[in-house]
Amino acid sequence: MTVCNRCGKENQDHYKFCLGCGAELTGAAKPASDVGMMKTMMAEPGQSPVGGAPLRNSGPTPGLGMPPGLGRPTGGMAGMPPPGPLGTGPTAPPMMPQQPMGPPPGVPGFSPGFAPAPAAGMRRCPSCGSDVPPSFRFCGTCGFRMDEVSAPAPLPMPPGPGQGGPLGAPQPQRARLSMTLIRPDGTEGGTHDLRPGENKLGRQFGPVFENDGYLSPIHALLDIRAPNAVVRDLDSLNGVFVKMTAEEELTNGQIIRIGQELLRFELIAQPEPTPDGTELMGSPNPGFWGKLTVIIGREITGAAFPLLGESCTLGRERGEINFPDDGYVSGLHARVTLKDGRVFLGDLGSSNGTFIKVNGERAVGHESFVLLGQQLFRLNLAG
């Protein structure tokens, strides 16, 4: 072994340069007239490794066992001298100079049919093609600095579909399945990624949900069968609401939301006598057929608004039922209508919409709005 005079690292006897610091190993055996050739072949970064004065050998190169004048494969294994044009000795027959074969573009040190694949974890020297262990800073054969070489350069692969190139034109990237938070001012907030099939939603399923105290840990399930989906309430405390897109029929006990107001619709039926024939006494009914009751908390209700006539409108400033302190309710927000014994709810072009609570499950589509806790989300199901 040859010990480097600069850093003290041990190197194999046939190495010309130290693997640790790149210094020339003065104790290594080398031909007397090799210095000029080695400087030429020890290409600095950005300098061609081929060039300079041709080598004139007067005998076999130490350690090779090859007669002078025979060509050597480019990109040889570690321990072999670097490739380059070789001259012939004084007594050797004249030989025609050979043009060295250059590597394919983008693949340093590679010559088809000659260079073996680098061993696992090894790096290939761009200058001479020798294999260099990953922990060495310099090539032991030619001294090339390997700091910026991390792995053998792969062969260029043809682009796949949608990646451009000669095999196909670029394809537009498909939008991902997601739900986007809509802030109170109407701007977009965070995004929660979705996947085909079942997606659980709640405080424990993503950063966009975790700070909403009105959400249950496991609140709802969104089952996506693009381009449609079904949202299911998983027995959450505060429920799941979907924004109406058209007039809908109300059933007894249905809960709706306008602005920050939670309202429960109830039918008012005519009182019936008890089984023993006693009639229930109450105030005279002028024709009320239903009522909307404000929900304040769990099992706690507030004001109740009876419904009379063919329709009743709700709003912040106008209509039969007003919520003047709720800034999220439009001046004229929604209407409840009685048609042929059936009750319907319709939005009147309000700014924030009218929402229906999901009883069990409900179908939703692309760009549907879903209200979870105190957060409004827009679904993107076109991915």
Image (cartoon, rainbow, N blue to C red):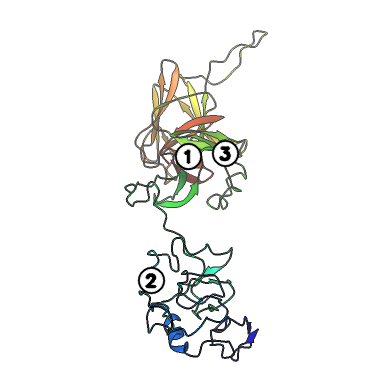
**How many discs mark residues in the rendered view?**
3
Residue 332: % across, % down: 36, 37
- Mark 3 residue element: strand
The residue drawn where x is 47% and y is 45% is: 179
Q: Is residue 5 above or below residue 139?
A: below
Camera-near label (1 vs 2) is 2
Q: Considering the image in quadrants, where does the C terminus appear?
A: top left
Indicate the quadrant where residue 368 lies.
Answer: top left
Image coordinates of residue 349 in percent, x first then y, are 34, 36
Q: Tell me whether circle 1 and circle 2 mark residues in contact (CB < 8 Å).
A: no
Dot 3 surroundings within 10 Å: few (below 14), some, or many (20 or more)? many
Residue picked out by circle 3? 220
Taking 84 as reference, is 222 above or below it?
A: above
Can residue 239 be seen in the rendering of this structure?
A: no
97 and 270: which is toward the camera: 97
Query: Counting other residues with Cα less than 10 Å from the Cα at mark 1, is it few (<14), some (14-19), or many (20 or more)?
Result: many
Tell me the quarter of the image containing the N terminus.
Answer: bottom right
The three-letter code of the residue at mark 2 reads Pro
Residue that numbered label 1 is attached to: 370
Name the kind of residue labelled 1 in the image: Val
Q: Position of residue 7 (x, y in %)?
A: 61, 88
- Residue in front for this viewpoint, 215 or 20: 20
* Residue occupied by mark 2: 100
| In the image, farthest residue toward the right | 276
Q: Which badge, 3 or 1, comes first in the chain's sequence?
A: 3
